[in-house]
Image (tube, rainbow, N blue to C red):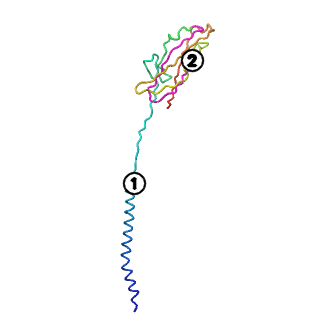
């Protein structure tokens, strides 16, 4: 009778628990190494507050009393009638209008003037605003920045007599666009 196969079988039986233990130790060691490397990770986070700029233009006839007047159907800044009353041929008259920026954004301004519908002049006097465009800086903290726009009305030197007693309304628009 040959005992060699039985001995081999016993040796294998004894080696199996050793191999299983070795594999278990390697697995635990590998997981431990992975856990150790995971313990050496780090993050850094940032936050950045963001806020939109404010944009607010106001107008004034005297440079001290300011109003929004941002509705063309309900203009709140009315130049006194006496400023352009009793125009004569060849006369030129001006009025200074004030614009302020109370917002936190700079403003690109474009000024324009037009005769409102309903003018009864047969020949409207020439109107202009200057400057026609400008830049108005943002308010400096609580202090608004201001600029002026000059409205000029000029009756032609050869203004026909049929314009006597006639009238019209000039609408000045100062349009602002927020800029950086």
Q: Examine the rendered structure and indicate whether residue 139 appears above or below residue 151.
A: below
Q: Nearer the viewer, mark 1 or mark 2?
A: 1
Exactly how many numbered labels are in the figure?
2
In the picture, the quarter occupied by the N terminus is bottom left
Residue at x 41%, y 24% (from the top left corner): 143
Q: Is residue 57 left or right of residue 161?
A: left
Write down the residue under mark 2: 128
Work out whether 61 lies above or below 40. Answer: above
Q: CA distance from mark 1 to mark 2?
A: 69 Å
Magenta stretch: give its range.
88-115
Tell me residue 99's x, y (percent): 48, 21
Q: Is residue 45 above or below residue 150?
A: below
Front in this rendered view, residue 102 or 27 = 27
Determine crowd level at label 1: few under 14, some 14-19, many 20+ residues with C-alpha closer than 10 A.
Answer: few
The percent position of residue 58, horizontal first and vertical second, equals 46, 23
Would residue 123 be found to the left or right of residue 20 on screen? right
Magenta stretch containing residue 67, yes or no? no
Q: Could you say which quadrant of the image residue 4 lies in? A: bottom left
Q: Is residue 111 magenta?
A: yes
Residue 40 shown left or right of residue 153 in the figure: left
Mark 2 surroundings: few (<14), some (14-19) or many (≥20) residues within 10 A: some
Q: Which mark is residue 82?
A: none
Q: Main secondary structure of the magenta part?
A: strand
Earlier sequence position, callout 1 versus callout 2: 1
Residue 39 pos. (x, y %): 37, 56
| Residue at x 51% of width, y 19% of height | 149
In this orientation, which residue lies closer to the viewer: 120 or 70?
70
- Residue 41 bears which disc, if any? 1
């Amino acid at each position: 009778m040959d005992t060699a196969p039985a001995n081999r079988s016993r040796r294998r039986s004894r080696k199996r628990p050793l191999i299983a233990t070795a594999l278990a130790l390697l697995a635990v060691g590998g997981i431990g190494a992975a856990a150790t490397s995971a313990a050496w990770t780090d993050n850094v986070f940032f936050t950045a507050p963001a806020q939109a700029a404010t944009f607010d233009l106001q107008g004034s006839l005297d440079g001290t009393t300011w109003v929004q007047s941002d509705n063309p159907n309900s203009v709140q800044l009315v130049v006194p009638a006496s400023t352009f009353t009793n125009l004569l041929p060849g006369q030129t008259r001006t009025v200074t209008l004030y614009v302020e920026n109370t917002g936190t954004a700079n403003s690109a301004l474009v000024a324009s003037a037009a005769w409102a519908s309903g003018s009864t002049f047969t020949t409207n006097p020439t109107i202009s605003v200057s400057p026609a465009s400008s830049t108005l800086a943002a308010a400096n903290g609580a202090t608004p920045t201001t600029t002026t726009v000059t409205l000029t009305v000029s009756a032609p030197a050869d203004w026909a007599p049929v314009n006597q007693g006639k009238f019209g309304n000039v609408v000045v628009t100062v349009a602002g666009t927020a800029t950086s």
